[in-house]
Image (spheres, coloured by chain):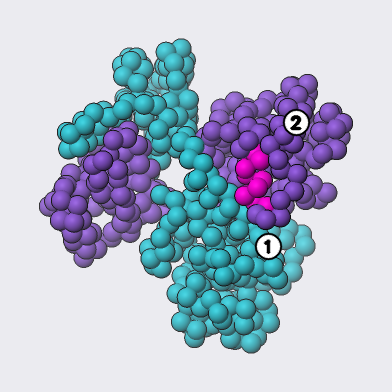
Chain colours: A purple, B cyan
Amino acid sequence: MDRRVAFFVSDGTGLTAETLGNAMLSQFQGVEFDTMTLPYILSEDATRQAIAKINEAADRYGNCPIVFSSLVDRGHRDLLGRSRAVILDVFQAFMGPLEQELGVRSSLKVGQSHAIHDPEAYRLRIEAVHFALDNDDGVGWRHHYEKADLILVGLPQAGKTPTSLYLALQYGLFVANYPLTEQDIEDASLPEVLVPFQDKLFGLSMDPYRLALARQELAGDDLQGCCTDHCTQETEAARALFEFNQLPNMDVTKMSVEEISTRILALTGLKRRLQ
Amino acid sequence: MDRRVAFFVSDGTGLTAETLGNAMLSQFQGVEFDTMTLPYILSEDATRQAIAKINEAADRYGNCPIVFSSLVDRGHRDLLGRSRAVILDVFQAFMGPLEQELGVRSSLKVGQSHAIHDPEAYRLRIEAVHFALDNDDGVGWRHHYEKADLILVGLPQAGKTPTSLYLALQYGLFVANYPLTEQDIEDASLPEVLVPFQDKLFGLSMDPYRLALARQELAGDDLQGCCTDHCTQETEAARALFEFNQLPNMDVTKMSVEEISTRILALTGLKRRLQ
């Protein structure tokens, strides 16, 4: 397999260049990519150091590195252009058409995106994270479901916790978790504590085999009640409970946390609190 | 102020188009943007619905919408091109040069980036999230610092929890938190429990005024020990403790969670476990 190195070069966090670059590279499945992020390139010196790393990699790999750059400063961009790499320059590609359409020049200020500290947004994220932590699996006795934007319902280890935290960090949403207990499954009815919040509920289910595996991994040696048969019964019961109570729900077996989160937003129409 | 609408159109989560688009738009500070993400555009029907939304916005705003598209399917991209918008097409901009350099055609498969479910990566993220939760503020008595990649040290409400969760979700890192207590501050020495892990420590500090504000917001009416004078003393003591014990440390007052996280990686050289 062809092996390449790709760099994500940025004057800020590097998240824009990384996100874009990874999306592009994922389209070339016959090539193996080693990636490296070079963030906070804010001076000519830092740019020269980045170029040295890129050129060193060109020698080591014996082929041309791919560089995704979101540098804003024109001098640094020109300098970077002298490295022995293919440069995919985000600003070059999109700023021209945008300036033309908007009829204004861009500010060409570095660190305008992810590094912005918006105190209100920061506060909201912190609050949302604390809400998720305080309303997570197993602490239902001190829940504040009335403040929740969304309540994820599902069997333990079906992906509720990382999803609620992702939704909190990324979108500032207040997301609670309700783990279905053996008793809930036996009763086959919506837990009473959830009844007043029917319109906030969203069910997550997972393939029983993956669920058993997730539980085994979490339990380590201390394995309890997580054989696949048991998980199959529980999963069927949970899905029946979702259907019977008309909960919107989703099988998240093959989904990343990002996909689970964005699909929930798309399906529920829930508005994000942070853009 | 000029007011525009921008759409992020994607066949997947929309995160690539959003990230790129927001970075570009943040360069135009004289224009106010309303943004809308249209994810999971996977059919001709869905594309037509997206176009209807875009055209409706063109009418409503009385100007031309900006569309950042990461659609992969050529038919859907061509169709989208007929909407009354400026289309900034990620694939069009970057795929040509990439294919030429790599000497292969891209797979043009939808949902190749954020939606990829890599079971190993998923497991690692979940494990890292649980590690962060189990080793968070105030649960130090059952810490597993020996397994930590990094231990954040700082006063309560100085940003440790969201940072540890972001590093877990984004990079799969195992990050513990140690909140400095009044006793630690009085003792003015590195807490004993941290001594064996000196090389994993990273100190976070914050402007006392912001710290007081953060504590007030969290405490609500139940305000305790968070006047600015008190926070000033604590902050000075915490910074002195960092310096005296040669902990790498950073003032995070004006930073977003993304910036705190990526700067820590850049400063410590810590390798991410997830790309």
In this rendering, does residue A184 appear at all? Answer: yes
Q: Is residue B152 above or below residue B274?
A: below
Q: Quadrant of residue A39?
A: bottom left
Tell me the distance, in whole angstroms, between the alpha carbons under discs 1 and 2: 47 Å
Residue pictured at 41% horizontal, 68% vertical: B268
* Residue designated by label 1: B216
Circle 2 residue: A233
**Residue type of the residue flagged with mark 2:** Gln
Asked if residue A73 lies left or right of residue B140, the reply is left
> Residue A205, located in which quarter of the rendered image?
top right
- Nearer the observer, B19 or B113: B113
Task: Characterize the magenta stretch by its predominant secondary structure.
Answer: helix
Q: Residue at x 27, y 48 (%)?
A: A6
Q: Quadrant of the N terminus of chain B?
A: top left
Residue A248 image offset from top left, x and y in percent: 68, 25
User: What range of the chain is rendered magenta?
Assistant: A211-219
